[in-house]
Image (tube, rainbow, N blue to C red):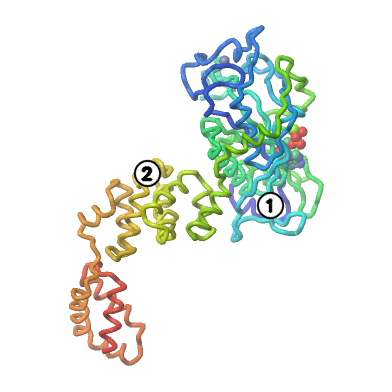
Amino acid sequence: MAKDRLASVLERWEAVIGLEIHTELTTLNTKMFCGCPVAFGGEPNTRVCPVCLGMPGALPVPNQAAIEATVLAGLATNCEIAEWSQFHRKNYFYPDMPKNYQISQYDLPFCVDGFVEIDIEPEGAPQRPDRDGAYTTHIGITRIHLEEDTGKMIHVGGSEGRISGATHSLVDFNRAGTGLIELVSEPDIRTPEEARRFAQKLRLIWLTLGISDCNMEEGSMRVDANVSVRPRGESEFGTKAEVKNMNSFKALHDALAYEIVRQAEELESGGRVVQETRHWDAGAKRTSSLRSKEEAHDYRYFPEPDMVPFEFTAEWIESVRATLSELPDEKKKRLIATYGIPVHDATVLTGEDLDMAEFFEAAVTISGPERAKAVSNVMLNDLSMHLNAAGIGVAESKVVPSMVAELVALVDEGTISSKQAKEVFAEMAETGDAPGAIVELRGMKQVSDTGAIEEIVDRVLVANPGQVEQYRGGKTGIIGYFVGQVMREMGGQANPKVVNEVLARKLAE
Ligand code: ADP
Ligand code: ZN
Ligand code: MG
C-alpha cells in the first residue's frame, strides 16, 4: 500500500493500537506442566507425554523456571508482581489442544501495570503529545501472564498450509504445553511505526533476559494487533479489529498501515467497523475477516483445580530481580557515559539486536576508548550497509570486532585514507581477511612520507605555473586542484592531510 495513503488518512484520523504478544519460553529445558523437552522441530508427536497429551488422570506440575522467566519479564518491563496469583482453565475446542482447555491466567496474572519506553527520533518520525502536553514514548503494559502453548495443525492437500482446499489435517503436539507468556499492552500506540518499535523493544528485552529465541518466523514470538481509528481530536475510542498472522516486524507495520486506511475509508464512506478478528495475508498485502471476536464469557474461565494458588514473597521477588541482566535502555546509557558516543549511535547499537553492542564493546576493547567514535562510525555505516545488503545479522558476518579495530587504527595512524578504508572494508566483508593483510597484499599503503610527497608536489607546481599564479594572487580555493593532481600522480595513495600541508607550505614560499 502506498505510504502517502496512510499519511493522508492520518491527517484526519488518529489510530489507536494495543498489542497482544505471545512469546514461547523456548530457552527452558522442559514444557510448562510436564518434563517433555522444549525444542523447535523434531518428528511430529515425539516430544509428548500423558500430561501434555491431556490423558485422563494426568496431573500438571508447574515449571518453576517458567514462573521465574515470567516474573523476570515483568520486572524488566516495570510491572508490579502479584503477591497472590493462580492459573485458570480457559475452555475452548480446537483440535490442536488435547485437553480442550488451556491452562492460562485470568483475573490474577503474575505481572500487571508496567511500561516500556520506545525511541522515536524527532525528524520525520511520528510523535504525539501525551496528556501532559509533552512528547512521549511511553507505552503502558496492562499485564503479562503465563499459559501453555497449543499444538500445531498441518493442513495437507490444496495450497500449502491453507484450510481451504486441504483434503485432510494433521496435528503435531510437540509444541503443546510449552510455556508461553502473553503480554497485553495498553491502547497507547498511535502509529504502525510505534507498534513496530514497541514489539522490537520487547523482543530485545526478552532476548536480554534469555527467556526465548523470539523467532517470529518460526512463531516463537507472535504479535496480534488491536487497532481502531477515531477522528483527530476525538477522545472516545472507535471500534477495534484484531489483526493476526504477522510473522515479521515489517508485516506488523504493513498490516497496521493497511488496516488503518481500510477502517478510515470504511468510515468515510458511511460504513462502520465491525469488531472482529482479521487475518493478514502477506502475499496479497491485505487483511480479511476471519471470525467474529470471542468474549471472555465464551471461554468459561474457572480456577485450575489441579494446582494450588501461588503466593510470592517480597524476598523471592527480590531474589529474581537480582538476576536481571543489563537491559537495553541501561546499556544505551552506559555506552554513552563510558565511551562518549552520541545518543544516536548508542540508540542504533543497542536498538536492534544484542550482537551489535557486544561487537562494539569487543572492538573498542581492542582499539582503545579514544577510537570508540571511529569504531561506531564504521559499524553504523559500512557494517550496517554490508549486513543489510547481505540480509544477515552481525553474528553471521565474516567481519569480526578485531578487524574493525584494526581498520580504524590503520586510518587513524595514516596508513590508509578513509576512502581506502571503504575498499578494505568491502574486501574484508567478502573474504574475512584481516585489514592489515588486505592493505599489504593490494599495496594500498598510503604514502605519508613527506619527502616522497614533496617531490611530487614540486613537480605538480612546476607543471602548473598559471594555477600557482592564481593561488598566490588570492584564489586559495584552487588548492583542491593541486591536491587532485598530486593524488593522481601518486595513484590515490598519498595521505591527503600531508599533501595539503606540503602544498600549503610550498605555495606560501
Ligand atoms: P477485549 O475485551 O476485546 O479482549 P481488551 O480491553 O482486553 O479487549 O483489550 C485487548 C487489547 O486491545 C489490548 O491490547 C488493548 O490495549 C487493545 N484495545 C482495547 N480497546 C481498543 C481500541 N478501541 N482500539 C484499539 N485497541 C484497543
Ligand atoms: Zn509432556
Ligand atoms: Mg481482553
Q: Is residue 154 left or right of residue 422?
A: right
Instruction: Residue 467: give x, y in percent of width and height.
Output: 27, 86
175 relative to 18, above or below: above
Sequence-wise first label, 1 or 2: 1
* Residue at 22% over, 67% down: 491
407 relative to 352, above or below: below
Q: Residue furthest front?
A: 315
Q: Is residue 384 left or right of residue 81?
A: left
**Three-letter amino acid code at the position of disc 2:** Ser
In this rendering, which labeled residue sits more in front, label 1 or label 2? 2
**Residue on which the image places disc 2:** 397
Q: In this rendering, does residue 433 appear at all?
A: yes
Cβ of disc 1 within 8 Å of ligand 1?
no
- Taking depth in this image into account, of 242 and 503 the one nearest to the observer is 503
Instruction: Residue 450: give x, y in percent of width and height.
Output: 22, 75
Indicate the secondary structure of the residue bearing disc 2: loop
* Residue at 77% over, 28% down: 295
Label of residue 9 in the image: 1
Label of residue 297 in the image: none
- Taking depth in this image into account, of 347 and 91 the one nearest to the observer is 347
Indicate the secondary structure of the residue bearing disc 1: helix
Instruction: Residue 42: give x, y in percent of width and height.
Output: 46, 19
Image quarter in which the C terminus is found: bottom left
**Three-letter amino acid code at the position of disc 1:** Val
Instruction: Residue 274: give x, y in percent of width and height.
Output: 76, 36
197 relative to 288, above or below: below
